[in-house]
Image: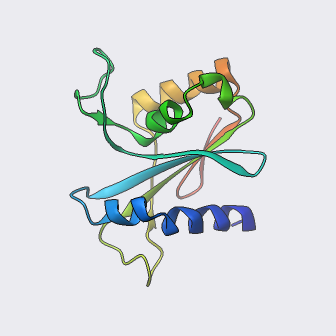
Amino acid sequence: MRQSERWLLDQILSNPRTVNLKYAHFASIHVAVLMKRGRIIAEATNGFGSRSRGSGYCASSIHAERNVVKEIGNIHELKGAEMYVVRISRNKDLECEDPFVGSKPCSQCRVFLEKCMKEYGLKNVYYTPPVILD
C-alpha cells in the first residue's frame, strides 16, 4: 500500500461522521472520497437522500459513489480526479484491527462511474481490496 493510500485510509477512519455511522444501523459503511492533486475535494458515505424517479434505487437510498459526485456539485470537477471507495465493517473494531472489507460497485454504480470516466474525465476508481475500474 502506498503511503498516500494509507494516509487517505487514516483520514477516513478519523472522520467523526464515519465513526458515528459505524455504530448506526448499517451492516457496513461505504465511504467514497474524491482526490485531485493529492487533496481531498469531496467525501461522502452511503446513506439516505432524495433520488430521482427511475434511478434504480429506492426513494431514500444513495450509494457512496453517487453521493460523492453529488457532493462536489459541479460534475466537471471530476476531470483529473481519482475516486477511492472503501467499505468499513460494522463488526470490526476501528482501533484493534483492519476494519476495511471487500467492496465492489453494484451494476448501476459501475455504469455511472464508467460514464463519469468517459464523459467527465474521472481518472480512476479504486475499491477495497484493491480493485481498479478501467
In this orientation, which residue lies closer to the viewer: 1 or 62? 62
Residue 95, position as x, y percentages in the image? 44, 82
Q: Quadrant of the C terminus?
A: top right
Q: Which residue is drawn at 23% across and 27% down?
A: 59
Point out the residue furthest to the bottom here.
Answer: 96
Give the quarter of the image for residue 113: top right
Q: Which residue is drawn at 34% across and 64% down?
A: 20
User: With 6 as the anchor, is 38 left or right in this view?
Assistant: right
Total labels: the figure holds 0
User: With 106 as the anchor, is 68 left or right in this view?
Assistant: right
Q: Residue at x 53, y 32 (%)?
A: 69
Point out the residue furthest to the top here.
Answer: 54
In this orientation, which residue lies closer to the viewer: 107 or 22? 22
Residue 80, position as x, y percentages in the image? 75, 34
Residue 47, position as x, y percentages in the image? 32, 44
In this orientation, which residue lies closer to the viewer: 132 or 99? 99
Q: In which quarter of the image is the N terminus?
A: bottom right
Residue 116, position as x, y percentages in the image? 60, 25
User: With 66 as the anchor, is 117 left or right in this view?
Assistant: right
Model colouring: rainbow
